Image (cartoon, grey):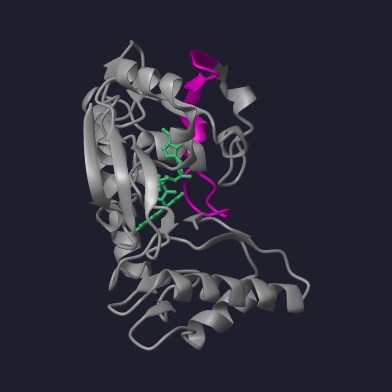
Amino acid sequence: MRVLKNEPLKKYTTFRMGGNARTMYVPETEKELMDLVQENSRILQYVIGGGSNLIINDAKEFDEVLCLREFNQTIEHRGEGRFYIGASVRLQKAIRSVNKAGYGGMEFLFSVPGLIGGALYMNAGTGRTTGKFISDFVLTVDVLRDGTRQTLKKEECAYAFRTSVFQSHTDWVILGAEFQFPAMSAEDAQKGIDERLALCKKTQDMSYPNFGTVFCVSNGKIMDFVRRFHIGYKNGCTYSAKRKNWMLHREEGTFEQAIKLLNRVKRLHRLFGKACKCEVRIWE
Ligand SMILES: Cc1cc2nc3c(=O)[nH]c(=O)nc-3n(C[C@H](O)[C@H](O)[C@H](O)COP(=O)(O)OP(=O)(O)OC[C@H]3O[C@@H](n4cnc5c(N)ncnc54)[C@H](O)[C@@H]3O)c2cc1C
């Protein structure tokens, strides 16, 4: 296991923000992860995967952080489109491997800069109208729970739009999952990837570091107002003028600004009696 001291967390997030981890543990096997958690369950307070859905306080030192990027890189084809994929596998690598074996379906996640574990936790997918999610392909999910490896059936994972049972059990670690994919030709799979990447290039705002969509529940009209008025701080954190419900971290951005911007939008929703829920996870 790698143990890193005074590790800058901004390196680990797509938002490029965060204070240091005094100690970062990077287990390289499932056994190392299990031993570590058994010894010290407090380690589960701050868990990072691909870091693509996180805002981390830049004014705070975090005692211990658990980085899950290396402990389970398994991709195993168990036959007829059934795959076991480890939590540390990048989504792009998982998709390419499934496609290579003649199966597919998850190409809509090719644009998502996360890991299988984070995607299972968030139930990553497209928007509500197109409604495709990683959970569409899940058979079972393996978790480390109360010190042991347990297998949950998909029905036990409480999957819904951008949510899962894992979000209410932050002391569990997703180890990997078994998936069932339909057969797919290499051409169709590549077409799915190309279409997704072209759509994202056209609609997403990659001009500065970001974490994708900000709120998983919000009001379209309010979010359009926020986009049109480009609400934010000069040279700092700001809502995108291009993409609704999207925040950018410009050069002088701070955690404090990002949180103020989140709260401002929540207040607007409250004012108009509309529901609003953050998709991004926050380390205060
Ligand atoms: C440019 C861009 C585009 C995006 N597009 C999309 C999109 O199209 N659809 C979409 O749904 N999302 C999208 N996102 C958001 C994000 O990529 C997803 O939510 C992704 O699934 C997060 O995975 P991650 O590995 O980066 O998780 P992290 O950000 O590292 O973690 C997210 C949460 O999951 C927890 N977690 C991570 N791994 C584990 C594990 N193994 N066990 C237990 N808990 C864990 C963390 O503690 C944290 O609370 C986008 C983000 C960016 C930057």
Residue at x 52% of width, y 51% of height:
130
**For this rendering, which residue is in front, 80 or 89?**
89
Looking at the rendering, the stretch of residues picked out in magenta corresponds to: 123-151
**For this rendering, which residue is in front, 112 or 276?**
276
In the rendered image of this protein, does residue 124 appear above or below residue 43? below
Count of numbered tags = 0
**Where does the image place residue 157, in percent across and percent down from the top left?**
60, 28
Left or right of residue 69: residue 135: right
Q: Which picture quadrant has residue 154?
A: top right
In the rendered image of this protein, does residue 279 appear above or below residue 50? below
Residue at x 30% of width, y 62% of height:
16
**For this rendering, which residue is in front, 82 or 2?**
2
Q: Is residue 180 visible?
A: no
Q: Is residue 198 magenta?
A: no
Left or right of residue 274: residue 25: left
State which quarter of the image contains the N terminus. top left
**Where does the image place residue 155, in percent across and percent down from the top left?**
63, 24
In the rendered image of this protein, does residue 57 appear above or below residue 124? below
Residue at x 45% of width, y 69% of height:
246
Q: Is residue 127 magenta?
A: yes
**For this rendering, which residue is in front, 112 or 164?**
164
Residue at x 34% of width, y 45% of height:
114
In the rendered image of this protein, does residue 56 appear above or below residue 222? above
Which residue of the protein is positioned furthest toward the right in this rendering?
273
Q: Which picture quadrant has residue 169?
A: top right
**Where does the image place residue 70, in percent across and percent down from the top left?**
25, 31
Q: Is residue 163 visible?
A: yes
